[in-house]
Amino acid sequence: MFSSIGLTAIISMVSHLIFIYITWRVITTVNIDPLIRKGRETEARILIIFITILIGTGVSRFFLDFIQWSQDLMYLF
């Protein structure tokens, strides 16, 4: 029982990190320099990090939920 909970935790953590990394790679390809005010580069970078975490964890959560839902389908019948 506890090994199942631990395995789920590791899979969730790895999934979140992978999707955050993928999101970071995608967001860094977008040129946002024209949107950044002079002297506010640090705040803009922090905002990009927060947006990356938000999007990455949201996508990861969707995939983890979808996997869980597909496993729960066996209880339908």
Image (spheres, helix red, strand yellow):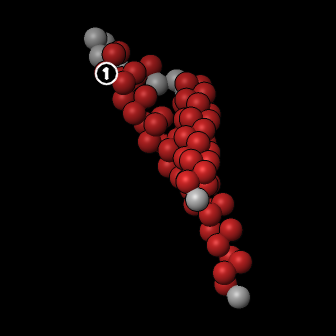
Residue 64 in view (yes/no): no
* Quarter placement of the N terminus: bottom right
Image coordinates of residue 76 in percent, x first then y, are: 67, 84
* Quarter placement of the C terminus: bottom right
Q: Residue at x 66, y 60 (%)?
A: 67
What residue did someone put label 1 on?
43
Q: Residue at x 60, y 38 (%)?
A: 14
Quadrant assignment, res 69 = bottom right
Q: How many marks?
A: 1
39 sits left or right of 7 in the view = left
Q: Residue furthest top?
A: 39
Residue 56 lies, with reference to residue 35, above or below; the image says below
Q: Secondary structure at mark 1?
A: helix
* Amino acid residing under circle 1: Glu
37 sits left or right of 76 in the view = left
Residue 46 in view (yes/no): yes
Q: Residues within 10 Å of mark 1 (few under 14, many from 20)?
A: few
> Viewer-proximal residue, 66 or 45?
66
Image coordinates of residue 21 in percent, x first then y, are: 59, 31
Q: Residue at x 55, y 29 (%)?
A: 24
